[in-house]
Image: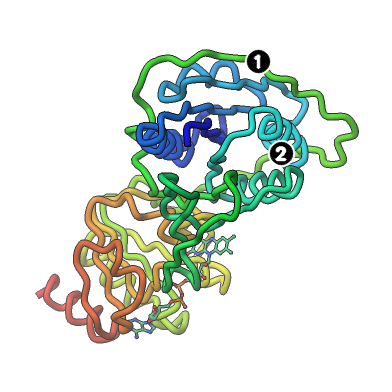
Amino acid sequence: MAENILVYVEHLNGEVTDASFGLIALARQLASVNGASVEAAIIGGGAHGLAAKLAGADTILVGDTDTFGDFNPQGHSEVFAALVTSREPAITLVPYTSVGMDIASLTAATCNLPLVSYCLSVDAQDTLSATCQLYGGKVEVDVEVEGDRAIFAMLAGCASPDEGRSGGAGVVESIDVAVPDLGITFVSLTEPESGDVDITTEDILVAIGRGIESEDNIEEAQELADALGAALAASRPIIDQGWLPKSRQVGKSGLSVKPKVYLALGISGAPEHLEGMRDSSTIIAVNSDPQAPIFGVAHYGWVGDIFDFMPELTARLEG
Ligand SMILES: Cc1cc2nc3c(=O)[nH]c(=O)nc-3n(C[C@H](O)[C@H](O)[C@H](O)COP(=O)(O)OP(=O)(O)OC[C@H]3O[C@@H](n4cnc5c(N)ncnc54)[C@H](O)[C@@H]3O)c2cc1C
């Protein structure tokens, strides 16, 4: 196989996202095995300025337009689908993010191509295949694609964003961005509320998940956080219950954090959660289920009850 690899480049607030740099690094790895070329497509306002940062791609396809606003699923996916049709990449890589989920599924439907989601890795040596997560990361499956072209929606962490930031300058090509009859209009980007602790700048985070069981038990986690000089963070169910503010949510639909220490208490480690914390320097997990996927990313783990762990550690720190 020597066909090209096309990467969808996501950008937000004038910055290319880490997930996109990771995909460029992955595309380079695949290309080095197959002799393929790497193309990166960047669409939307300010795309021309951002193209200069996409060092790892051989060709950068730029659709610079303010018509779509920051993100318009219809506008972006129609332009991208036209590229997938005209460039005929064997492999199309899209980040499995809130934006990427829209792009990948709409493009796959428009181009009538198979879509493989929740991918951890892709292999293209003989046939196209991928390793994907199921059931919140508890199961990994190997998927083989029928045919010689597919779209892969890649989970964060599949390759190093830093690797995707280096390389020679690619050839920049402008692309057509005319999309008639836009049925969706970008209204505004809602930033998370401010005023609370900024968990993205904290060195130590004590993160609680559904294992905390009830709002009344959060005090115990807060006492441990205080003893450690840490801030309290949480998985999404805790926020959905209204037990902590949205500004404490880690993950795909929350914040990405990279503290020195991330202590995960009663968190299973679903892909959407891992996406926001797997780059932490040291991850320590406590979970009563030895099969919990969080242990797959943790540097240290203890299989046990958080209600034994929290008071014991707090007492030792205070003692
Ligand atoms: C589009 C989308 C976006 C999402 N965005 C996010 C996001 O930003 N952040 C996020 O976190 N999730 C997000 N999710 C939800 C995600 O899929 C998971 O449902 C969620 O992360 C699970 O949270 P949890 O680990 O706290 O709960 P669970 O998966 O229920 O895990 C609870 C864990 O606690 C353990 N446990 C229970 N009791 C104890 C005890 N006493 N001691 C020790 N361990 C115990 C259990 O073994 C289990 O592993 C998103 C989902 C979707 C579809």
| Classed neighbour count for the residue bearing mark 2: other residues with Cα under 10 Å, few (<14), some (14–19), many (≥20) | many
Q: Is residue 136 above or below residue 45?
A: below
Give the residue type that dot 1 points to: Ser
Residue 287 place in picture, x, y as percent: 31, 78
Q: Is residue 65 above or below residue 111?
A: above
Frontmost residue, 17 versus 26:
26
Residue, x 39% and y 76% (percent of image)?
218
Residue 97 visible, this angle: yes
Residue 309 place in picture, x, y as percent: 22, 80
Residue 286 place in picture, x, y as percent: 27, 75
Looking at the rendering, in which quadrant would you find the C terminus? bottom left
Q: Is residue 278 left or right of residue 133?
A: left
Q: Is residue 87 above or below residue 188?
A: above
Residue behind mark 1: 174
Q: Which mark is residue 245?
A: none
The residue sitting at the left extreme is 319
Mark 1 → mark 2, Cα distance in angstroms: 17 Å
Residue, x 76% and y 44% (percent of image)?
110
Q: Is residue 312 left or right of residue 237?
A: left
Give the residue type that dot 2 points to: Ser
Residue behind mark 2: 77
Task: Find out if the beta carbon at label 2 lies less than 8 Å from the nearest ligand 1 atom.
Answer: no
Residue, x 62% and y 51% (percent of image)?
101
Q: Secondary structure at mark 1?
A: strand
